[in-house]
Every structure is written in structure tokens, then in C-alpha cells.
């Protein structure tokens, strides 16, 4: 099968070369494409603007000789000198040596006919090439330099020389030396109007950078990010294999199951049969535990057709693992070891001096920080002030007088479309009475000693209070005050009123999540419960009796790993009883028999003697974004999707031909 495909590809390329030979009219250099004023409006996706149109036009008559010249213009086929060093690794220790280097030409600086500089970059860094009058560089090299466009690919020979003291460039790793050219081979001349220069990409619109990703990837930052990603993956594999984990690949062509997220489906030529891409390898890894694999891991591709956000991609990578016979603490210990090894290798940092990562209960996280992924690098904690009627609580953030934002900033943050938060400026005059003047004061409950309350929340005249009332029992991922807290923090940070150290790594396990939450997906019946994480998470053992009458009160054996306000991983101990799993599907989540039947493979596997097991998945892209100190996960993915979920490099998703549609028995209904 493979050989047939390979043969037909060769045949196709030969055919296209032949048709070029038949059709080309004039040397391409005479017909360079016009400069594109707007890269987005590039009109013809089937034809590269970087090859002259006349080259493939049908009205052409080329002589064989002209065609050969055209095909070879600016390109070297066949042998060229073998590289002896990489550009960025040369140092003063190489002075006097003859070297062969390869890389991408940068902009030539011609100081005079005698003195010409040509910086050149490869994956290791930049070096300055030079010819000057005394080097006796041949006219041929001088002529070649006039032909070289930036980003052309070169192979050069030369001698490493020391720069004179005045010419040393301390900002350049190779700034103490340069290479005096003795020969240049142009391996591939670049089109003279590139969409952008990799060195200037930060000034270019992101969509253009994503479309011409191979140019953007040449830049220093993305090169470094991809190298770090590769290094981190290696450290992770090394660590997990040392802990007796087995790397197992699981299928990409999976099945549609109501696991939680919206899936991507893949049609087949059978009209009634579809695959779905896995939202995670969750079900397969549980099957592997029943298969006796004991400790599994995979650096796995996952697919979710969900709303896109800055830190989400429809296709993303997880470090996925699962362990048999282990407790939550065992699994957390293994993950801590993994994260520790990565931080040590990539950051040179010993996390928590080898000690355990801190843990926080979900209700504590939600009430103190208003988030299930609290950023604990700064204070601004939400404090309980007093009880209110109807099982509500009065809570507050205290802004200290010496570091509070301006009145207009406070107003902007506390008056949202959804809600206006009471704000009270504390003075000597209202210090002992503010509580009783609040809009919600008629609902205050219990014994209220305002002096004690002031003391417990550390309130002083001059401070400002932002107040809110909320239910005692919290659910979801963020509270209204949690949002206010984060907005205050970012405003205060931008005004220099709050320091949030970027190199402090506050890892935290959040535990004690509710096992089920109210359904948030508007397309599903709203009177049902949904699994807070996924339907395979085991309940906390002592909450099991609640499952039968108050499932919303049951806590799950789930744990999230949070770092500086970002969830970087989540996992749980799983249900390993086939009966309990079926009960959760059918009685708690109220799945139809058709829906729960889609998990029959899993229930079967649990029935065949599946050990107690649990695991976790780390979001590898998010982890890398934090390690590479970049806000966007697109910066750590070689070929990411755009903000609207498109691969702008290849132009996908794209339409199918009518023939393909009929082969797959798909009818497109245009809305
Ligand atoms: N499969 C889960 C997820 O993707 C992680 C886990 O529970 O191991 O979030």
C-alpha cells in the first residue's frame, strides 16, 4: 500500500515538472510578483505569490537551456562544503581557525566598497561575516553579496578573527569575533519581498505571522520556546520511565461518548458511522489499568470543539498519566516529582526545597480567593465579615490606605453590568458605624461587635472596603468577588501599587471539589446535574451515602494542580466499581440508555477485575507557556490555530470537493 502511494507521488511530481517545462514562457526574474499591500487579501491560495505567475502560464515557450537556467537560478543542487561549526557556538577560542558555516543571511551593511558586513543566523545564534579591503576577497564574493537577499540560505567558508576593541558588541553572544569570508555558496536565494523579516516579527499582525509561520519560527523567541518544549518533554519522559511508567499510545480515531466536552467528529465512507477525536485518552487509560499496565503515561494530543480563549486551542497536548493501586497522595507525590524535575532542568529552581506542595480545600479557595485556581502570590484576600439572612455571607476586600487604587479605578471595577458592589471609605467618623449603614444591613444576623469585626479584618480609618453578599455554599470556578480581586490586582500592579513576583512559583493542590455541579451547558436540560470534571471521578468515601439523596453535596476525589492562578493539571481517583459507575451514569447524571450504553466498554473493563486507580493530566501547552514566560500558548506550539480556530498556514478547515462529499455521503446544508 505504501509503495503504491509513493510511486504515484513520484509520478505526480514528474508530471508537474513536465508541465512546467511545456508551459513556462520567460525567465521568472522578469516577472517578480508585485508587493502585497495586504497579506490577508492574498487572492489565489492555489498559487504562491513567491513564484512568478508567468512561470506556470500556458502561453509559454521555453528553450531547454533557458528552463534549466531558470530552475537553477539562485539555488545550489548537489554538494556543498560540510559545516564545521554552528554560528552561535563560535568564541574567541576559535580565532585563527578556518570554519565552514551555514545559515540565513541578514541585512548586508555596506560601509564602503572595501568594508562589508553580513550577519548570518542559524539555529544556534548569530555571527558577523565580514569582507574588508585587506582580506583580498575576490570580486566573485563581492558580486555574490550584491545578489544576496535577506533570509537567503548560505554556506560560507572563512577565518575566525578577533574584533578590535571598539567593534566588540557586548549584546551579541559572538560579539567579540567575526568571520572573514573566503567563499560563499548561495544554497537558496530568498524571494526579495518576504511577508516580513523574522527579526521584526513583533511589529507584524499576528494573523500574518501565523500564516507565514515558518518565517516567524525562525525568530529567536519561538526557536527558544520550541527547544525548551522539547527539553521539557524529554525530562518528563525520563522522570516517568524512572518511576516505572510505560508510555502507551492510544487511538486518535475514537468514538463519540458523552464525556463532557464537545467533540470533533470524523465521517467515514459508511453513512452511519463516525469516529470522534478524543477529548483526552481518559477512557483508554482506564482500560489500560484493567489491562494490568500498572503505570501508564503518554504525551497525548487531545481535541475539544469548545469556545476558544487565549489559553485554549481546539487541539492541545496533555501529559497524561494513570496509576493502579495508588492513593491521591501517591499520585500527587509522583506529579510533584515530575514538576520538580522540569523546574530544576529548565529554570534551575528547587521547588519547595524538595518538600510537599501546599494543599487547599475548594470551598476555602472559593471563599478566600473567589477562584478554584487561586493566585496566592499576592494578598487582597476576600474576608468574611458577618452572616446574612437566608444562608448568605457578607464578605469584603480591604484596600489599605497606603496602597489603594484611585477612586475612578475602584468605581470601574466595582460597577459592572451584572452587579454594583457597595464601596465604603472608612473614616474616624464612620469607623464604628459603617456596618449598620450598608444596603444589606437589615439582613445582618448573629451577635455583631463592630470593634471585633474591624479587628478581625484589620480595618483602619483611611482604608476602603469593597463589599458583597454571597451564598454560603459556593460552586463553579469563580465568584463575583474573585473577579473583582483579580481586576484590582492587575490595576494595582500596573500602577506600581502591588508587586506580583513573576519568578515565584506558587504551586497548590486544590481538593474537595463538588462531584457534581448544576448544568451550565444551555443546550442540555437545565434541571440536571453535570459531572464537575468527568463522570468517572470517584466520590469521597464518607460522602457516599449522600449520593442517593443529595448528590449535589457529594465531594469528589478530584485534585487540581494550580500555579499562580492557572490550572495546569487535574486528575482524580476513579470509580472502579462497575455498579457504582452505572449508577452515576444513569441515576445521577440521568443519561439515557443510549448515552450510558456508549460507555459499555468501560463498564465491561471495570467488571473484569479492574484495580483501584487514579491519575492526572497536565496541560503541557500551558505549562510550557509559564516556563517560557509568555502569555499565549500559541507561542509554545509550532503550528497553532488562530484565535478563530483556523490553521492559517495550510488554510484549514477547508471545503471538500463534491466528489469527496459524495464519497462520504455528506450533504452540506448552507445556512
Ligand atoms: N482526562 C482528564 C482531563 O482531561 C484528566 C484526568 O482526570 O486524568 O481533564
Image (tube, rainbow, N blue to C red):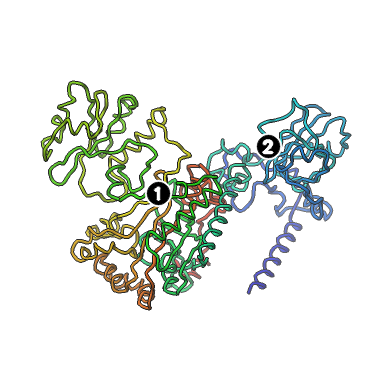
- For marks 1 and 2, the one nearer the N-term is 2
- Please name whichever residue, 326 or 554, is drawn nearer the observer in this view of the structure: 326
Residue at 26% in and 40% down: 418
Mark seen at residue 227: none
Q: Is mark 2 within 8 Å of ligand 1?
A: no
- Circles 1 and 2, Cβ within 8 Å, touching? The answer is no
Looking at the image, residue 330 lies above or below residue 164: below
Q: Picture coordinates of residue 59 (x, y %)? A: 72, 53
| Residue under pointer 2 | 173
Q: Picture coordinates of residue 30 (x, y %)? A: 75, 43
Q: Is residue 611 left or right of residue 539?
A: right
Q: Picture coordinates of residue 656 (x, y %)? A: 51, 62
| Residue under pointer 1 | 562
Residue at 76% in and 51% down: 25
- Report how far apart the C-alphas of labels 1 and 2 lie in the structure: 36 Å
Name which quarter of the figure residue 539 lies in. Answer: bottom left
For the N terminus, the image quarter is: bottom right
Quadrant where ligand 1 appears:
bottom left
Name which quarter of the figure residue 326 lies in. Answer: bottom left
10 Å neighbourhood of mark 2: few (<14), some, or many (≥20)?
some
Amino acid at each position: 500500500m505504501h509503495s503504491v502511494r509513493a510511486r504515484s507521488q513520484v509520478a505526480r511530481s514528474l508530471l508537474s515538472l513536465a508541465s512546467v517545462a511545456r508551459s513556462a514562457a520567460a525567465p521568472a526574474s522578469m516577472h517578480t510578483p508585485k508587493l502585497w499591500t495586504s497579506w490577508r487579501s492574498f487572492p489565489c491560495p492555489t498559487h504562491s505569490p513567491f513564484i512568478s505567475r508567468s512561470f506556470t502560464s500556458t502561453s509559454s515557450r521555453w528553450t531547454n537551456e533557458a528552463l534549466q537556467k531558470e530552475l537553477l537560478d539562485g539555488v545550489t543542487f548537489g554538494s556543498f562544503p560540510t559545516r564545521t561549526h554552528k554560528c552561535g557556538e563560535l568564541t574567541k577560542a576559535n580565532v585563527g581557525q578556518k570554519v565552514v558555516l551555514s545559515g540565513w543571511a541578514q541585512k548586508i551593511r555596506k560601509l564602503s566598497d572595501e568594508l562589508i558586513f553580513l550577519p548570518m543566523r542559524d539555529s544556534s545564534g548569530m555571527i558577523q561575516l565580514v569582507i574588508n579591503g585587506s582580506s583580498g576577497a575576490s570580486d566573485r564574493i563581492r558580486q555574490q553579496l550584491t545578489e544576496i537577499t535577506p533570509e537567503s540560505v548560505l554556506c560560507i567558508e572563512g577565518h575566525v578573527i578577533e574584533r578590535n576593541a571598539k567593534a566588540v558588541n557586548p549584546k551579541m553572544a559572538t560579539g567579540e569575533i567575526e568571520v572573514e569570508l573566503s567563499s560563499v555558496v548561495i544554497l537558496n536565494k530568498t524571494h526579495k519581498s518576504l511577508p516580513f523579516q523574522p527579526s521584526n516579527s513583533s511589529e507584524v499582525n499576528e494573523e500574518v505571522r501565523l500564516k507565514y509561520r515558518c518565517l516567524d519560527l525562525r525568530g529567536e523567541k519561538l526557536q527558544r520556546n520550541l527547544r525548551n518544549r522539547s527539553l521539557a518533554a524529554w525530562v518528563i519522559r525520563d522522570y516517568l520511565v524512572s518511576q516505572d511508567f510505560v508510555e502507551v499510545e492510544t487511538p486518535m480515531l475514537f468514538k463519540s461518548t458523552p464525556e463532557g466536552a464537545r467533540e470533533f467528529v470524523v465521517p467515514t465512507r459508511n453513512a452511519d458511522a463516525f469516529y470522534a477525536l478524543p477529548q483526552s485518552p481518559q477512557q483508554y487509560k482506564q482500560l489500560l489499568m484493567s489491562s494490568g499496565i500498572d503505570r501508564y503515561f503518554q504525551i497525548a494530543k487531545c481535541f475539544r470543539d469548545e469556545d476558544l480563549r487565549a489559553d485554549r486551542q481546539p487541539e492541545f497536548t496533555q501529559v497524561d498519566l494513570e496509576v493502579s493501586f495508588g492513593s491521591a497522595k501517591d499520585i500527587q507525590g509522583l506529579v510533584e516529582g515530575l514538576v520538580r524535575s522540569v523546574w530544576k532542568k529548565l529554570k534551575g529552581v528547587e521547588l519547595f526545597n524538595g518538600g510537599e506542595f501546599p494543599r487547599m480545600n475548594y470551598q476555602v479557595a472559593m471563599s478566600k480567593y473567589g477562584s478554584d485556581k487561586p493566585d496566592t502570590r499576592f494578598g487582597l484576600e476576600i474576608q468574611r465579615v458577618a452572616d446574612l439572612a437566608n444562608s448568605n455571607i457578607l464578605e469584603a476586600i480591604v484596600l489599605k490606605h497606603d496602597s489603594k487604587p484611585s477612586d475612578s479605578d475602584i468605581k470601574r471595577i466595582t460597577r459592572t453590568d451584572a452587579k454594583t458592589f457597595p464601596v465604603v471609605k472608612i473614616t474616624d467618623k464612620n469607623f464604628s458605624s459603617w456596618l449598620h449603614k450598608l444596603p444589606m444591613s437589615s439582613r445582618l444576623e448573629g451577635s455583631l461587635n463592630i470593634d471585633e469585626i474591624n479587628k478581625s479584618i484589620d480595618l483602619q480609618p483611611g482604608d476602603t472596603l469593597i463589599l458583597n453578599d454571597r451564598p454560603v455554599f459556593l460552586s463553579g470556578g469563580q465568584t463575583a468577588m474573585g473577579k473583582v480581586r483579580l481586576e484590582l490586582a492587575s490595576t494595582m500592579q500596573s500602577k506600581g501599587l502591588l508587586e506580583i513576583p513573576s519568578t515565584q512559583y506558587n504551586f497548590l493542590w486544590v481538593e474537595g471539589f463538588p462531584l457534581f455541579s448544576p448544568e451550565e451547558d444551555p443546550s442540555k436540560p437545565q434541571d440536571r446535574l453535570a459531572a464537575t470534571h468527568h463522570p468517572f471521578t470517584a466520590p469521597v468515601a464518607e460522602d457516599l451515602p449522600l449520593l442517593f439523596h443529595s448528590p449535589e453535596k457529594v465531594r469528589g476525589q478530584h485534585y487540581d494542580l494550580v500555579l499562580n492562578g492557572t490550572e495546569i493539571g487535574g486528575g482524580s481517583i476513579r470509580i472502579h466499581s462497575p455498579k457504582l459507575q452505572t449508577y452515576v451514569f444513569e441515576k445521577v447524571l440521568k443519561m439515557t440508555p443510549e448515552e450510558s450504553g456508549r460507555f459499555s466498554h468501560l463498564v465491561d473493563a471495570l467488571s473484569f477485575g479492574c484495580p483501584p486507580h487514579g491519575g492526572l493530566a497536565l496541560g503541557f501547552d500551558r505549562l510550557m507557556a509559564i516556563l517560557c514566560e509568555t502569555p499565549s500558548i500559541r507561542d509554545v506550539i509550532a503550528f497553532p490555530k488562530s484565535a478563530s480556530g483556523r490553521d492559517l498556514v495550510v488554510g484549514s478547515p477547508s471545503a471538500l470537493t463534491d466528489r469527496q462529499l459524495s464519497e462520504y455521503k455528506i450533504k452540506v446544508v448552507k445556512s
